[in-house]
């Protein structure tokens, strides 16, 4: 089942549909029971302290407390005055099964926290509008000083669901996100505040969520189904020829890493064109050194590859060279030095632009902190300016295409090292060269890169390099396709 990303306003729109259909009570019951189930699984012993706000987020907490109480867990509930109708209803239901709901005051919270084995934060969810008002600010300080783990419902209290920033807000060990991901749970400091996130999709008509969603988050099975199946009679002429145009004295490794990424993603032929001496990191690569770029383009004549990656370590002439490449109108990955504002308006539908936040800020003529506050909106703005498809790189990367946004799953913090993006460019060019549609190549390519990073991270931790990631690409491909192409795997190993 697809996963979606929703802003607070979009989640609230679905809530209103549920309300009109008379289903909101059931959704709150499902949300609360999912929280209780998770508590039993992950934190099976000791007293559970619930801090409940007055909105529906507090209502979810009251439902969870009731479920745990009837299952025999010791619970304590401190609650603000209930404003939401369903929160009032669930307060009565909780009291009906014998649990007292004491007023939530700072002093009581302070005392109760000391005896708790787990604190469930149900103060504020998507109905929060910054800045945090009293007494919630004091309560957040008390929660953050607690020695027990904290589990937040939907989103840590004090986090603005839309933004990657975090001011005064709960630091959770675990967050149960309801219905879909909120942007804040995916990016930056706000995601760090959420700890481990468990998504509980809720029994809501998928079409309602899809109609509202800001972005999708494809599962591995969905990504695997996009990757091309190769026939047993495939040969190097059918697996795509990729050209890499990059490298400059001092940055020759970038072009080599891109080429290695393309080979490891299954390209039949990979040729590097450069005016610098490119190290032959894999003897399977073809490397052509040209005297100057004009001579290179003369030598190309009318010959064209199936896909081209341009810009990695390319140096000061990159915009000019990329513009000539764009006139070929073939599947093209533009990265690094080729990501220049003067290319805006010169792209085409088969372009895949791959900026990191610094390059993206340069293209949008804004600052990097401004851009990283709202990565989804930034990716969309870039796509509108550049056309084609944009991969805004990060942990996680966002793919923006005409009419849609997709957020990649996974990756590894060890991928924060030089050359990772160059490898990604090679992966993307390889997938384009193997005939994939540009949107699917981008979505599948970023996940393939992240999956290879996860595997390499298990072996090398924070010491992993881009070369290590490239070496895991074949295994990552197998991981992603194992669910969707079992027959093909068996066929390809026949004797
Ligand atoms: N389909 C789904 O996903 C489902 C979602 N569900 C749940 O609904 C939640 C959203 O519920 P919601 O809309 O009632 O808002 P919620 O977050 O509880 O906050 C409202 C309270 O916060 C207060 N408040 C606001 N700003 C504040 C500030 N700056 N400083 C201090 N206080 C502030 C505000 O106070 P007031 O402004 O009224 O004084 C009001 O009392 C969602 O996160 C999920 O948990 C499930 O129940 C079922 C299905
Ligand atoms: N913490 C992380 N989690 C997941 N992916 C990451 C993380 N850090 C970096 N990456 C990935 O590594 C790549 C870095 O790209 P980039 O900054 O262009 O590197 P370079 O220019 O050195 O090649 C991107 O694809 C990014 O998504």
Image (cartoon, grey):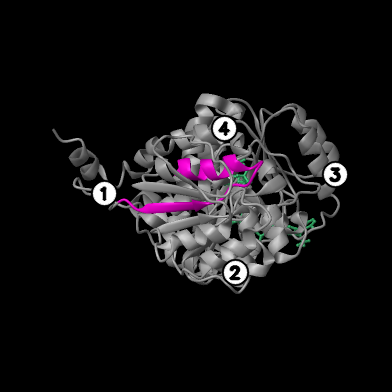
First in residue order: circle 3 vs circle 1: 3
First in residue order: circle 2 vs circle 4: 2
Q: Position of residue 167 (x, y in %)?
A: 80, 49
Q: Position of residue 184 (x, y in %)?
A: 66, 52
Nearer to me, 123 or 248: 248
First in residue order: circle 3 vs circle 4: 3
Q: Position of residue 490 (x, y in %)?
A: 20, 38
- Can residue 154 be seen from the camera position used here? no
Cα separation, mark 1 vs mark 4, equals 29 Å
Cα separation, mark 2 vs mark 4, equals 30 Å
Q: Residue at x 84, y 41 (%)?
A: 106
- Can residue 359 be seen from the camera position used here? yes
Question: Looking at the rendering, which quadrant does residue 111 occupy?
Answer: top right
Boundaries of the magenta span: 239-261
Q: Residue furthest bottom?
A: 345
Residue ID for mark 3: 138
**On-image quarter of the C terminus:** top left
Residue ID for mark 2: 386
Q: Is mark 3 within 8 Å of ligand 1?
A: no
First in residue order: circle 3 vs circle 2: 3
First in residue order: circle 1 vs circle 4: 1
Name the side, left or right, on which 303 lies relative to 354. Answer: left
The 10 Å Cα crowd at callout 2, few under 14, some 14 to 19, many 20 or more, is many
Residue ID for mark 4: 465
Cα separation, mark 3 vs mark 2, equals 46 Å
Cα separation, mark 1 vs mark 2, equals 32 Å
Q: Is residue 420 above or below residue 179?
A: above
């Amino acid at each position: 089942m697809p996963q979606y990303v929703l802003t607070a306003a979009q989640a609230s729109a679905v809530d209103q549909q549920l309300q009109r259909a008379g289903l909101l009570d059931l959704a709150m019951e499902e949300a609360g029971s999912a929280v209780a189930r998770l508590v039993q699984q992950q934190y099976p012993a000791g007293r559970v302290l619930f801090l409940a706000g007055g909105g529906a987020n507090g209502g979810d907490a009251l439902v969870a407390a009731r479920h745990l109480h009837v299952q025999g867990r010791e619970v304590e509930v401190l609650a603000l005055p209930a404003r939401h109708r369903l929160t009032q209803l669930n307060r009565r239901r909780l009291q009906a099964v014998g649990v007292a709901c004491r007023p939530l005051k700072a002093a009581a919270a302070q005392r109760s926290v000391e005896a708790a084995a787990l604190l469930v934060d149900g103060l504020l969810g998507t109905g929060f509008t910054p800045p945090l008002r009293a007494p919630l600010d004091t309560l957040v300080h008390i929660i953050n000083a607690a020695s027990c783990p904290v589990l937040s419902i939907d989103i840590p209290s004090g986090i603005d669901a839309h933004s990657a920033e975090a001011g005064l807000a709960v630091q959770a060990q675990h967050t149960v996100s309801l219905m879909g991901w909120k942007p804040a749970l995916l990016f930056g400091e706000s995601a760090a505040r959420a700890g481990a996130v468990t998504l509980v999709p809720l029994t809501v008509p998928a079409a309602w969520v899809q109609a509202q969603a800001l972005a999708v988050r494809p599962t591995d099975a969905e990504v695997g189904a996009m990757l091309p199946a190769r026939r047993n009679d495939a040969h190097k002429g059918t697996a795509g020829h990729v050209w890499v145009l990059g490298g400059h004295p001092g940055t020759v490794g970038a072009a080599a890493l891109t080429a290695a990424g393309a080979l490891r993603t299954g390209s039949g032929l990979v040729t590097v064109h450069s005016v610098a001496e490119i190290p032959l990191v894999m003897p399977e690569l073809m490397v052509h050194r040209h005297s100057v770029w004009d001579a290179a383009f003369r030598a190309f004549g009318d010959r064209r590859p199936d896909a081209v990656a341009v810009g990695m370590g390319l140096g000061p002439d990159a915009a000019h060279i990329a513009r000539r490449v764009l006139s070929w109108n073939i599947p093209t990955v533009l990265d690094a030095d080729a990501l220049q504002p003067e290319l805006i308006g010169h792209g085409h539908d088969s372009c895949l632009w791959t900026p990191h936040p610094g390059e993206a800020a340069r293209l949008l003529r804004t600052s990097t902190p401004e851009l990283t506050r709202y990565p989804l909106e930034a990716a969309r703005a870039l796509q509108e300016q550049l056309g084609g498809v944009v991969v805004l790189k990060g942990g996680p990367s966002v793919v923006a295409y005409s009419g849609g946004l997709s957020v990649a799953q996974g990756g590894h913090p060890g991928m924060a090292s030089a050359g990772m993006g160059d490898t990604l460019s090679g992966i993307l060019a390889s997938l384009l060269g193997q005939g994939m549609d540009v949107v699917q190549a981008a979505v599948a390519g970023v996940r393939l890169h992240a999956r290879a990073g996860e595997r390499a991270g298990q072996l090398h931790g924070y010491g992993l390099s881009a070369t290590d990631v490239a070496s895991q690409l074949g295994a990552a491909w197998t991981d992603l396709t194992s669910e969707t192409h079992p027959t093909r795997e068996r066929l390809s190993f026949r004797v």
